[in-house]
Each structure stands twice: as C-alpha cells, then as structure tokens.
C-alpha cells in the first residue's frame, strides 16, 4: 500500500522546532530519557490528565509494552476492523487474537458480543477507538470485570478524544497512542503507553529501557523502545498549537458531516454520545464497493487523496488462522472511504468534496442499503 498523506500533515512552526533542536544539541544528549523526552512526558500527562505515561519509539511498540506490563497470556479479544498493527503486535509477542465483530454504525467493537468470545485462555480485551470515536467504554469495562479480563485501548486515533468529560486515554488498564506523522499529534515516529497502575508503569518503564533498573543493572527482560530527543522536540513544538489543530479539525469535520447529512445518503459514523471524538478521520460508507470506487476516481480527479481505510479485515490476514466470519467488518471494508481532511482545508474544498459524494450518493438514492441497521 503506497504511503499517502491521506489525513493529516501537522508541521510545526519552523523557528520553534529549530530552537528546540538547538537546545537538544547543546544539552549534549540525543537519547536515553533526556530532558526533551521527560518534558514531553510530563506535559502530555498534564494535558491528558493521566498519571502514568511513557513515550516509546512507536505506537506498535507501546502496545507490546502494554501487553507485557500487564503480563497478558493466551487469547486477547479484539476487533477485526483496525490497522494491521492492532493484531500483528499481538502475534509478534506470541499472543492469540480472538475476533469480535464491530457495531455496524460506530465501527467500534460490539460489547454485546464479547462474552460469547471469552474462553478459559482469554486474558484481556483490546478495543480500538476507531477513527477517534470513543468505544463503548462502560460496557467493555463491565464485561471485562465480569470475566476478570484486563482492558487495553488502542487509542492510536484518539488524541484529544474525551469520554464522560475525561480524556479517553484515562480508561482501562492501559491505553496506547501512536505518535506517527499521520496522526493529529505526533513525534514523526513514536508512541505512548498510559497505565493505570503504578506497578505496571514501573514494569513498562524498565522494559522500554532494555530491562535496566534505576541502578543501571538488568532487572527484567526488556527491549529498546526509547524515543529520541529530536523526536520529542517535534512533539514539544506541536503541543503548543494542538488545541488550535483540534478545534479547526472539529470545525472542518462538523461542516462536512452536516453538508453530507443534508445532501447525500452516504452513511456517516455514529458518534458515541457519552464522549467527543477528535474527528481524526472522516469516514463515509457507500451502498456498495462500485460507488466507492467511483467516489475515489472523482475525488482523485479533483485533486484529493482519499483512502480506503481500513481496507483489510484483520481476521483475513495471512498470519491469522481461519476463524468465524466477521460479516459486518467484511462488508464495511469494501464500502468505506476516509475523506482527506488535511489541516487548514478550506470551506471551498470541503464543498467540492461534499458535492462529489452527494452526486454519487444522492439523498433519495434507491440503492441505499444500511447493513444490519
Ligand atoms: C497508527 C496506528 C497504530 C500504530 O502506530 P505506529 O506508531 O505506526 O506504530 C496502531 N493502531 C492503529 C489503529 C493505528 O492507526
């Protein structure tokens, strides 16, 4: 799959970034938990109002650090509708994925199907806040308590998302952010793990640093998961403006969503009323794959770069053993398109996109098919 800046390109003020880079150089320290990493960790913990946050070299690694810090074993119940990392990160550390299909409109894991997927070897639920829309956290936590499972949220899309007036990252035993360059807030490459318990945090902190304890001796099995000072400088340079980025993203997304509601029958993501999405992505779902393909051609001709995201159900990946079909996800991946809402997009561009979708998918279309609704 070709890399394309389909969603966000958040570039910091150059002067500010350069000043931070100079500061790193003059500190004489480029990595190993330096001042920039420590400052970014404490500013993020404060901004997100969480206690235990650690930066890592990627979101993928942050997931794996979470699995190990929580000492997960056996099977992990997760969603088939996500980026490949959600499940490849499990398999890479020898954990098994057991899939539970999504809700047809929120695109998040369906909590009512989780209990049926629990087996004696289940140890956790790994849910995703898909496209920044908070999962049904209350229901997921309830079923986890009932079956004594841990909860991990892949919150790669959910920087700035809230749930019941708190950062969505403060829920569960662990939440994980990706700070990859395509995300709303990023460090070019990077990630963060947020842990609820102090013990798990201490284990994670040690694990990220090759298992070294505070005395510099190896205490446990670890890996090099450190973020560098220059990557942290990128985060610091972007953090000052993040509220403005989130605000303008909300305005663009709300504008286009209401345009589409009025002028098209394309399905929009149903947003969780208990929280607020960061509108990190704007997915639209077409009645069928052919109409989606026509939308891709029309948008591309008009100069946009839309992306079929996510385009592969995770239960069909080559390294996953065949299991039960996931019909809601499988249908969705054929019909979904994430509209390219770059930062600073104009109303005129949003209108062009909205009209293209409205023409292909008019309000009274006889082709409307709502899956499972
Ligand atoms: C981006 C992403 C990740 C992985 O993050 P990296 O920082 O690229 O390793 C994990 N899960 C989801 C849903 C993502 O979109």
Image: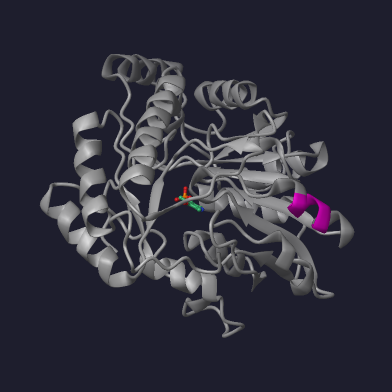
Q: Position of residue 305 (x, y in %)?
A: 22, 50
- Image position of 25 with respect to 189: above or below: above
Q: Position of residue 6 (x, y in %)?
A: 29, 48
Residue 239 shows in the view: no
How many numbered callouts?
A: 0
Residue extending farthest to the bottom is: 322
User: Magenta region's main secondary structure?
Assistant: helix
- Seen in the image, is 118 located left or right of residue 364? right
- Seen in the image, is 359 located left or right of residue 267? left
- Residue 289 belongs to the span the image colors magenta: no
- Image position of 317 with respect to 93: above or below: below
Look at the image and give the residue range highlighted in magenta: 139-143
Image quadrant where one finds the N terminus: bottom left
Query: Which residue is more in the foreground, 133 or 295?
Result: 295
Residue 325 shows in the view: yes
Quarter of the figure with residue 14: top left
Tell me which residue sits at (74%, 73%) in the image. 117
Q: Position of residue 243 (x, y in %)?
A: 46, 21
Tell me which residue sits at (61%, 82%) in the image. 324
Image quadrant where one finds the C terminus: bottom right
Quarter of the figure with residue 262: top left
Query: Which residue is more in the foreground, 20 or 164?
Result: 164
- Residue 140 belongs to the span the image colors magenta: yes
Q: Position of residue 202 (x, y in %)?
A: 76, 39
Q: How is the image coloured?
A: one colour
Tell me which residue sits at (78%, 50%) in the image. 141
């Amino acid at each position: 799959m070709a890399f394309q800046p389909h969603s966000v390109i958040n570039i910091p003020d150059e002067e500010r970034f350069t000043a931070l880079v100079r500061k790193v150089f003059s500190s004489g320290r480029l990595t190993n938990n330096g001042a920039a990493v420590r400052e970014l960790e404490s500013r993020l913990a404060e901004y997100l109002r969480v206690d235990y946050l650690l930066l890592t070299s990627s979101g993928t690694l942050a997931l794996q650090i979470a699995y190990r810090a929580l000492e997960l074993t056996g099977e992990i119940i997760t969603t088939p509708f996500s980026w490949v990392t959600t499940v490849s990160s499990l398999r890479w550390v020898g954990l098994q994925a057991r899939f539970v299909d999504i809700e047809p409109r929120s695109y998040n894991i369906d909590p009512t199907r989780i209990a049926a997927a629990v087996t004696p070897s289940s140890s956790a639920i790994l849910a995703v806040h898909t496209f920044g829309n908070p999962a049904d956290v209350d229901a997921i936590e309830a079923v986890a308590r009932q079956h004594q499972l841990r909860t991990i949220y892949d919150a790669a899309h959910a920087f700035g998302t809230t749930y019941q007036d708190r950062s969505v990252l403060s829920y569960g035993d662990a939440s994980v952010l990706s700070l990859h360059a395509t995300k709303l807030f990023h460090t070019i490459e990077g990630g963060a793990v947020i842990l609820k318990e102090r013990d798990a945090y201490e284990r994670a902190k040690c694990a990220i640093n090759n298992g070294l304890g505070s005395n510099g001796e190896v205490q446990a099995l670890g890996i090099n998961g450190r973020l560098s000072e220059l990557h942290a400088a990128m985060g610091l340079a972007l953090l000052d403006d993040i509220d403005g980025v989130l605000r303008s993203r909300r305005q663009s997304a709300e504008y286009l969503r209401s345009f589409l509601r009025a002028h098209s029958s394309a399905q929009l993501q149903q947003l969780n009323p208990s929280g607020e999405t960061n509108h990190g992505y704007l997915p639209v779902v077409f009645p069928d794959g052919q109409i989606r393909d026509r939308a891709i051609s029309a948008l591309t001709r008009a100069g946009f770069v839309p992306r079929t995201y996510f385009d592969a159900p995770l239960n069909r990946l080559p390294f996953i053993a065949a299991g039960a079909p996931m019909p809601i996800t499988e249908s969705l991946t054929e019909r979904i398109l994430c509209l390219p809402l770059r930062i600073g997009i104009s109303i005129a561009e949003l209108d062009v996109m909205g009209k293209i979708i409205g023409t292909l998918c008019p309000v009274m279309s006889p082709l409307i098919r709502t899956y499972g609704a």
